[in-house]
Image (cartoon, rainbow, N blue to C red):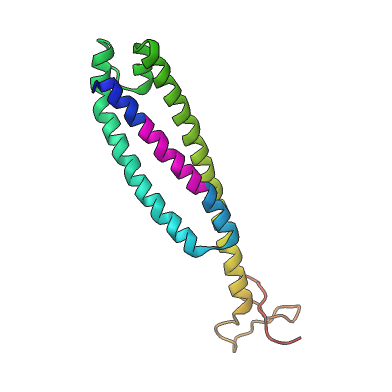
Amino acid sequence: MSAVAELTENLRELRRVIGELLTLSYEKRRVISHGDTDRLAEISSLETRLLSQLNAAERKRYAVAPAAMREISDGDGSTLGDLINASDGDARKTLSELKTELTSTMKLLMEMNERNTELLRKQIDHNADVIDVLTPPQDPLNNFYGGNGQLTDERQRGFYSGEA
């Protein structure tokens, strides 16, 4: 197999793995919203496996890119852009399409990861607030009553006291 063909297959593998990560990212958003911690743990496991595959594919891409460049031209660049610029015909078209797909999918994946991180932070903060409301102060002998007569902590959050 030629180095260019090997690189092309490698880029397709990268596209597949990144696509699977993106699909998991969308599912993760739904799972976080529903508080399904069991499925969230499963997704994290799947993501770890996919990230290992992604890293292996990236290492392979870095290894084969210089040989692909030597196969295409006398140039010394080894980035995907360099390879696209140096190639022609079907190779140029295929590499260009793969680069566009990888770039857009990766951008979407990064955006989804940022959104999921923010959603998870909000969910954790909400859960902490709920726990705080349901948990009485650690030292009930101290003055935890605020000006409105409710039990409070140092952050001035109210506690449920069991009184109506």
Percent across and percent down for residue 109 are: 49, 40
Left or right: 47, with 66 as reference point = right
Read off the magenta span.
12-25
Left or right: 12, with 122 as reference point = left
Considering every residue shown, the one lying at the far front of the view is: 1
Percent across and percent down for residue 19 are: 46, 39
Whether residue 15 appears in magenta in the rendering, the answer is: yes
For residue 60, what is the image quadrant? top left
Q: Is residue 41 above or below residue 113?
A: below
Q: State which quarter of the image contains the C terminus.
A: bottom right
- At 74% across and 82% down in the image, what residue appears? 149
Q: Nearer the viewer, residue 133 or 69?
A: 69
Asked whether residue 122 appears in the rendered view, the answer is no
Asked whether residue 156 appears in the rendered view, the answer is yes
Whether residue 31 appears in magenta in the rendering, the answer is: no
- At 27% across and 17% down in the image, what residue appears? 69
For residue 82, what is the image quadrant? top left
